[in-house]
Image: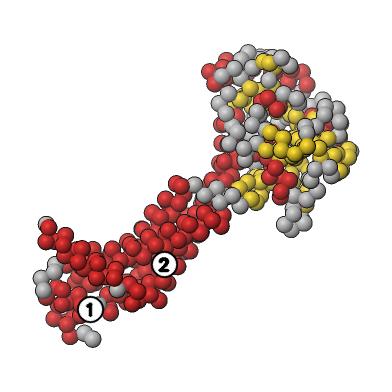
Amino acid sequence: MFRWLAQVAAVTWVNLRTIPQRRGASLATVVGVAGVVVVFVAVFSIAEGVRHALTASAGEETAVVLRSGSDSEMMSGLGRDDTRIIAEGPGVRRNAAGPVASAELYVIVDVPKRSTGTDANVPLRGVQPAAFDVRDEVKILEGRRFETGKNEVIVGRMAASQFKGLDLGNRLRWGQNDWTVVGIFSANGALAESEIWCDAGVLQPAYRRGTSFQSVYAKLDGPESFQKFKDSLTADPRLDVKVIRESEYYESQSRALIGLIRVLGVAITLLMGIGAVFGALNTMYAAVATRTREIATLRALGFRAGPVVLSVLAESLALALVGGVVGASVAYLAFNGFQTSTLNFSTFSQLSFSFTVTPKLMSLGLYSALVMGLIGGMFPAIRAARLPVATALREL
């Protein structure tokens, strides 16, 4: 066993040491693998960014109440009396101002993108004062909160960076009202940063919504209070509602978009990966061809086929690993934190998010690089091991 391992180490060292002599072909393999890893990590960082935006603030202690049968706020509708009953439900947290529950209204407004100037659908959410206690991650970065009863809005940090006209102090016209931007807020990268907030009581007449709302967000005493809260509301004959945990609601909202991104990511990676594997095959076949007499001499001196196979695979894996490290590093430096927006299919509004390159994604990128290196080196390695010694010694 020791002799066999010594042979593996000796042949592998010779192969790795001669890589600079084939720098052109070796560099092509590294670049090809790096390109695949960049695309893989970049595309999947989009899915990770979307997932983070939709679930970052979603907690087990917050419940979302919609009209029964509704899949999203856009399809829901609740009356003022309904929202009062919901806010007084058992298990809802209370503070000095009353129940920590916000009845909310959700409309879509046209705002031009900064990058293209084309109009995009941006959510304008009417909230009640308790919304800032329900979503306690919301922090004012610039300006102040809107005042109840006034035509004032605050804008999520991501929305302000992606869309024109949402700067502090600007005036805009939506519905029947002129609105003034009085604040910019953050929410730990959550969905709220893609939205514009205002007083629900002002938004209703601006869009002729009467006294209707679309949802109620309620902060509960704890996760264990959810079932009691849900059972009470669904059993109340005055209501026809659907009660769901906020975490489950946003997970369902993100499923279709994230699934599409991942499917596209896998398809693109596979197509590019095939090209990278062929590049590795070409490189390793060329490496074996240039060392045919060397390999035959080693075999004639008593080196076994196993060490030869492993040495070729080791060279291929080394090149792939270098490509993987380069690709993962480039993806992290170029894309991590990059801000953009896309269409949220559940609400048909823009969702602003940041590309999120996680250690797990970088590890998967390196793993895919090694798989490409393994496949690219396998067949040349087998050819090297099966090459007849006498024939090889006669080759130039």
The answer to whether residue 30 is seen in the rendering is yes
Left or right of 41 on screen, residue 173: right
Q: Residue at x 81, y 37 (%)?
A: 182
> Total marks drawn?
2
Q: Depth check: give the residue in front, 71 or 60.
A: 60
Which dot, 1 or 2, sits closer to the camera?
2
Disc 1 secondary structure class: helix
The structure residue drawn at horizontal position 78% and vertical position 50%, both measured from the top left corner, is: 164
Give the left or right position of residue 276, taking residue 377 as reference: right
Q: Position of residue 27 (x, y in %)?
A: 41, 71
**Quarter of the picture holding the C terminus:** bottom left
Q: Give, as a three-letter code, the residue at label 2.
A: Val
User: In this figure, which residue is indicated by the disc labeled 1?
Assistant: 292
Q: Give the CA separation, mark 1 to mark 2.
A: 23 Å
Q: Residue at x 33, y 63 (%)?
A: 318
Quarter of the figure with the N terminus? bottom left
Q: Which residue is mark 2?
A: 30
Name the residue rendered at 21%, 68% in the picture: 11
In the rendered image, the vertical position of residue 46 relative to residue 134, given as above or below:
below
Task: Name the disc covering residue 253, or none.
Answer: none
Q: Is residue 290 left or right of residue 198?
A: left
Q: Nearer the viewer, residue 66 or 9?
A: 9
